[in-house]
Amino acid sequence: MNKIIEIEGLSAGYDNKTVLQDVNLTVYKDDFLGIIGSNGGGKTTLLKVILGLLTPQNGKVRFYDQGKEVSTVRIGYLPQLNNIDKKFPISVYEVISSGLASQKKWFRSYTPQQHGRIEEVIELMDLKELINRPIGELSGGQLQRVLLGRAIVSQPQLLILDEPNSYVDKRFESHFYQLLEQINKESAIILVSHDIGTVLAMVKNIACVNETLHYHSGNDLTEEWLDQKYACPIEIIGHGHLPHRILKTHKH
């Protein structure tokens, strides 16, 4: 299997505080990795390191393309909704096209091929009737589609989703996860979420981040593994195609 990212002996944090210690992880070309963990456990810190927004204190992060080590790979990123400034005066088309900004030559327009790719993604996200709409006028589900379109328009080798269930519009939720299955045929996916039930229903492998990283191949977790690695007692309940999770009685 071709790997995309290899993390070895990683420690990371802020100022003099270490948040992650001795993290080892390999993400493969067709992977769909779910990352779970309690608040403050280091999930966001790990994402920042992968995205190049935070320099590790120790360890290595290596990227690969076709089996060869490279300096970076194309990464698409869908941030949490609360990190988006909906007052910024920009249209749906402009947001999605911004995902190709790094591939556009300075002071040049997008090429016909790039415009074609943008229109292809707009069609895929079912946003044709909204292309000129300012993002401040969109519902949560509509904005989610726009940001997902921006994340995939460059045809990334890796797509990172940070708490995608934070979007309040549930009408698009089932279609959203169907889209992820389709995207996963072309891109590896890392999905970070507090909703363990949703993660288990979607992903191929699991990583629990709680100061360090515990990897589990497959998504058939046991309560005992979760209790030990998540450091918070959890019970999983199946409910259709999108199981949910509840917390059992516990001190915190």
Image (cartoon, grey):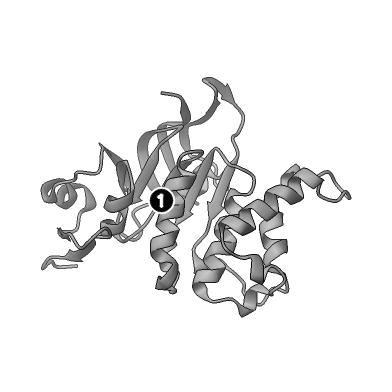
Q: Position of residue 150 (x, y in %)?
A: 62, 55
Q: Is residue 168 left or right of residue 54?
A: left
Q: Is residue 89 left or right of residue 183?
A: right
Question: Looking at this view, is 92 or 38 the one in front?
Answer: 92
Residue at x-position 49% and y-position 46%:
183
Please tell me how crowded label 1 is: few (under 14), some (14-19), or many (20+) other residues with Cα within 10 Å: many
Question: Looking at this view, is 123 or 212 the one in front?
Answer: 123
Does 175 appear above or below 156?
A: below
Residue at x-position 41% and y-position 54%:
178
Q: Residue furthest top?
A: 68
Residue at x-position 19% and y-position 66%:
246
For the C terminus, the image quarter is bottom left
Q: Position of residue 111 (x, y in %)?
A: 81, 45
Q: Is residue 122 left or right of residue 220?
A: right
Instruction: Kindly state the secondary structure of the residue where label 1 is placed.
Output: strand
Question: Looking at this view, is 17 or 150 the one in front?
Answer: 150
Q: Residue furthest bottom?
A: 137
Q: Position of residue 38 (x, y in %)?
A: 30, 58
Does 210 appear above or below 241?
A: above
For the N terminus, the image quarter is top left
Q: Is residue 17 visible?
A: no
Question: Looking at this view, is 199 or 111 the one in front?
Answer: 111
Q: Is residue 113 left or right of residue 14?
A: right
Residue at x-position 35% and y-position 47%:
34
Q: Position of residue 18 (x, y in %)?
A: 40, 47
As shown in the figure, which amino acid type bears the numbered disc 1?
A: Leu
Q: Is residue 61 visible?
A: yes
In the rendered picture of this protein, how many numbered marks are placed on residues? Answer: 1
Does 53 appear above or below 137?
A: above
Residue 69 falls in image quadrant? top right
Q: Where is mark 1, residue-wise?
A: 191
